[in-house]
Image (cartoon, rainbow, N blue to C red):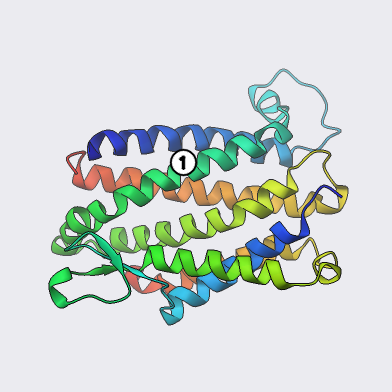
Amino acid sequence: MMTALLILHGLLAVALLGAVTHQALAASAPRNEPRTRSFFTRFRKTDAGAYGTPVAILFVLVMIAGAILYPRYRLVVRPLLQTLDLRAANGAFELKEHFSALGLLLLPAYWSCWKQPLEPAYDGARLWLTWIIALTVWWNFVVGQLLVSIKGLGV
Amino acid sequence: MRTHPRLMLFSLAACAIYTLAYYFDWSLFRYYLGTGTFGLSAPASAGAPILWYGWLATAVLGGAVVAGITPRSWTTRLSPELAWLIPAVAMLAAFMYELRWFL
């Protein structure tokens, strides 16, 4: 059951990672950028405003799955990290814990900034909040994958 | 105005309160690994406590109170720049707090 939830947690995180990365790059693209046929330019041409609510929902779903898995991490994975003296891995998860919480608490401001019609006064806040959420998601994803690599799926 | 000042204020206050909560250990409740129960205190047999859920609850409650009691005239004067500046400082503070693991 917990292994299935861990896989679901990972899959939801992949969807969140894709959505928020797309949005962050699209929000950063200058509006007067000339049209080219490059993949990167097309990637950034997406409608960033369409991602606000899906990113918020996915973030909450990933958090719920992570919060359910957390006691198993403390019982099974953390003691292993301590036994192997993997202090950096332990610390990386501690940061993941804080970044997840701060990201969740940021969601109301983030979602509010992306509500249509977009307010020009919040252009800067919208861009930076999106990048903060994106960097949080990237950190949490990479650390999660590293820990699964160390412990394996059998939680 | 579509951007909700109270939601902004909630996020800012909750991020600041979460930072204070883990630093000063203001956990609203604890989760005990041994018994698998939530509570304020428990015997040693209940096992190690998880504080994270409690810190998060403290931040949500604190943020809701701050956003709820602050007069509307104040919330509308909130600078949009604070919306990302305070969370960025909170993330940096978390990084500095956990730096001991990497040294």
Image quarter (top left, top right, bottom left or bottom right) of the C terminus of chain A = top left
Relative side of A104 to A86, left or right: right
* Picture residue at 40% right of the left edge, 67% below the top: B54
Residue A124's x, y, as percent?
78, 53
Let me know if residue A42 appears in the view: yes
* Residue nearest the observer in this picture, B61 or B89: B61
Whole-percent x, y for residue A69 in the image: 30, 48
> Label 1: chain?
A
Instruction: Classify the position of the N terminus of chain A by image quarter.
Output: top left
Say which residue label 1 marks. Answer: A61
Disc 1, SS: helix
Amino acid type at image mark 1: Leu
Question: As rendered, which of A137 and A86 lies closer to the eye?
Answer: A137
**Front-most of B88 and B63?**
B63
Q: How many marks?
A: 1
What is the residue that sits farthest to the top in this orientation? A37
